Amino acid sequence: MKILVCNVGSTSLKYRLFDLSSGEETLSEGKMERVGTQAGTWMHKDAGMKETKQTLPIPDYATGIRLMQEALLASALESMEALDCVAFKVVHAKGVTGVQLLDEAVLSAMAAFNTVAPSHNPPYIAAIRQFQQALPHTPMIGSFETGFHATMPPKAYLYSVPIALHKEHAIRRYGFHGASHEYVATRTAELMGRSDFKLISCHLGGSGSLCAIVNGKSLDTNLGFSLQCGIMHNNRCGDIDPYIPIYLMKDFGYTLAQIETMLNKESGLLGMSGVSNDLRDVEAAAETGNEDAKNAVDSYCYQIQKQIGSYAAAMGGVDAISFAGGIGENSALVRRMALEGLSFMGVSIDLAKNETAKPDCELTGEESRARVFVIATNEEIVVARKAKAYLLGRR
Ligand code: ADP
């Protein structure tokens, strides 16, 4: 069974072609960046995993999809009809979650939450429509990022606002990064050799979230109705007092558009440090004595640490903590600072192992009751497996 998994960003298109007929083989993969410009970049690995890189105009997704199609047909795929489906890691839709055939009704449900996921839903909808035009006979299947969190109890997903907002406008915590948290839970269970345990999954990338997972199921997570809350993100604010925007608008004349841009694009690591939205730059600036950069790194790690403590309380203990995502996999500093001082609750790491950690590895300290892992997350395989299960279920 051949499944093409596509991950659409506002200016990027990543793809991976799997053959899931018997095992789980990657046949080809690639990544386009700066889609929408004359100076796009394209990395493609063919069927022999030989890599080519080029800079070329990729003015729109339609061009990107055509280039990808031609490259896949050149070595990895005998014809587009050989493709069983295109699978997407879609983000958010009103009243829809789990694994879905991306038909008009589901695309409308996604559009109904464009305001809630402005950086994710509009480009996804546009790209899916262009895929539908390019491959009219191939099923398009979406795995919603919210799906993994469907097991949260009402006490975790309801907000303390009038209940009519939940009942009439679907306002509640949904949670995101479901494919990554699910992968981390499955992989940690393999490394633990058991499935009945309390895990805190820390997906730390440009956008980050933590998830409290009991026996493989999401109990709570710190992204919410939107992706604007929880810990700070690369340029989004994370949790702030909801009265800050009201104060700025009422007393200082900020407009709604200004507030939205500020919280969505100019906050988080970028806004706090004034340096960059890339943690590597912020860490480097902090090291050279930049006070704002140092505060941004301190705050980022402190927010993760507090969330770990609160999830340990929510679960009545913790057996494992796993780090994933660009930051979770690569920043020894963040892992060390986030876990510092947690030996009172049985969590400590081996500092030497932490410095040289490469996923998938274990960092557990000698005295630690909980085990600590670094996991190379693999959202694409989760999406491909779900699409396969969906297709088999339909037959
Ligand atoms: P996205 O959420 O966009 O998919 P990733 O999971 O790829 O992001 O993570 C991107 C982030 O990972 C970047 O912002 C960068 O700060 C961080 N990162 C990558 N490598 C390192 C590193 N060696 N040290 C610190 N941060 C890193």
Image (tube, rainbow, N blue to C red):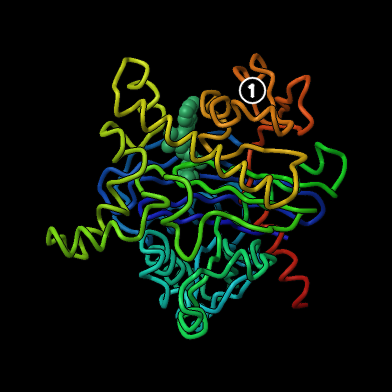
Tell me which corner region of the image, top left, top right, bottom left or bottom right, holds residue 152: bottom right
Q: Answer whether residue 267 is visible to the viewer in this image.
A: yes
Helix, strand or loop at label 1? It is loop
Which residue extends farthest front? Answer: 344
Asked if one can make out residue 88 in the rendered structure from this viewpoint, the answer is no
Q: Going 80% across and 44% down the picture, which residue do you hit?
A: 189
Q: Residue at x 64, y 45 (%)?
A: 378
Whether disc 1's CB lies below 8 Å from ligand 1 is answered no
Is 379 situated left or right of 13 in this image?
Answer: right
Q: Is residue 246 left or right of residue 321?
A: left
Question: What percent of the width, then of the height, locates residue 25?
Answer: 72, 46
Q: Quadrant of residue 157?
A: bottom right
User: On the picture, is 281 further left or further right than 308?
Assistant: left
Image coords of residue 243 (percent x, y)? 31, 60
263 w.r.t. 369: above or below: below
Percent x, y of residue 260: 27, 60
Q: Residue at x 74, y 78 (%)?
A: 394
Spot occupied by residue 68 in the image (x, y as percentages of width and height) = 47, 53
- Extreme-left residue of the structure: 253
Residue 194 or residue 109, whichever sits in front: 194
Q: Quadrant of the C terminus?
A: bottom right
